[in-house]
Amino acid sequence: MTLLWLLVALALIPLASLGLTTVMGRAAGWPLGAAFLGAGALAWPAVRDLLDQGPGGAVTWSHAWVPDLGLQLALRLDGLSLVFIALALVIGALVFFYSTTYFTSGTQRGFYLIMSAFTFAMVAFVLSDNLVLMFLTWELTSLASFLLIARSGHAGEAASMRTLLLTFVGGLALLVALALIVTRTGSSVFSEVIAHPVWQADPGFTSLVAVLVAVAGFSKAAQFPFHLWLPDAMAAATPVSAYLHAAAVVKAGIYLLFRFTAIFHATVIWNVLLIGLGTASAATLPRHAATGTPNRRARRSSAVSSGVVTLKRPSALSCQRVGIASMREQTWKTSSCRPTVTGRRLSATITCVTMTA
């Protein structure tokens, strides 16, 4: 039940932003950022239960959603989802705090409304144990990123359309993949789907779904050949681009790849795509670093690199069993989140995640 209250609290923050911006203007970022941290504190009982369970533990909640169709509103918190929730809430709060001094005029009502809705969609996505809810929140992050970039004026119009097209290609791929999964397994609950024997019994089906999920993940994580949308997103206001790169859209793609690795870790095409296209994405960095102004060069290259994920011996990673303790058993080499500040410009990205079993 704690997980549900977390989502309810986050869903109320966009509504609260309407009143707060009317009263406080752009300074509403202070209480709204604090609300993110407060909402995260609501999840502490679930986090404590997760820690008590040890490796492979998970906290779940489910309720009948559409009984006639057999759909359940299912939420699941494990070690992997906890990491991404912390990213979304903590970085979201920091971005809101920064926004109070970045913007110099206007109430920024639209910015705070869309950004807080964005945060809700991201947290709901990583908590989803239902494939339908997972897809809906996945698309909400795409829509929110489009609106945030589009509101950046004339420079953001073309960039927002390219972002929308590229990320929605991934959305269509994910929709087809999830439809095939539900049709073949007869379940829309991810934790049930992952244990279905079809993945070992039908390699052709497994490979097809793996390719579709990889396309979806690459489109969000700005991996080659979908990497072009992320430098375009620099047209948005700095708090927007910082959040897109550090905690939201890019991380949604990375989370999807991590989550489905539990199913596809032994699938050849999955490993080829992750390593091959991840390497190709890294190879694009010199070109991004060589174009534009010095500040923009640095932010472009760091933005694309934030999506680069290299998995060595993927079979050693079982996201189905990831818990806090099991995550400590892996060797993680993760760069810190380094804010780069020039004048009033800020770019916060997590530049690379390399996991070695």
Image: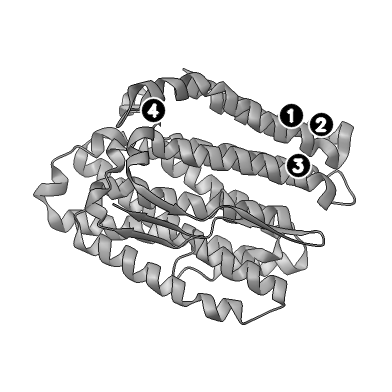
Quadrant assignment, res 271: bottom left
Alpha carbon of mark 3 to alpha carbon of mark 1: how far? Answer: 16 Å
Kind of residue sitting beneath label 4: Ala
Q: Earlier in the sequence, mark 4 or mark 1?
A: 1
Q: Is residue 331 left or right of 40 when viewed as pictured?
A: left
Q: Earlier in the sequence, mark 4 or mark 3?
A: 4
Residue 78: x, y in percent? 39, 32
- From the image, tell me which residue sits under label 3: 97
- From the image, tell me which residue sits under label 4: 74
Q: What SS does tag 2 mark?
A: helix
- From the image, tell me which residue sits under label 2: 20
- From the image, tell me which residue sits under label 1: 16
Residue 157: x, y in percent? 69, 65
Q: Is residue 66 left or right of 39 when viewed as pictured?
A: left
The one nearer the camera, 154 or 125, is 125
Nearest to viewer (mark 4 / mark 3): 3
Q: Is residue 282 left or right of 292 when viewed as pictured?
A: left
Residue drawn at 64 percent across, 70 percent down:
298
Residue drawn at 55 percent across, 53 percent down:
336
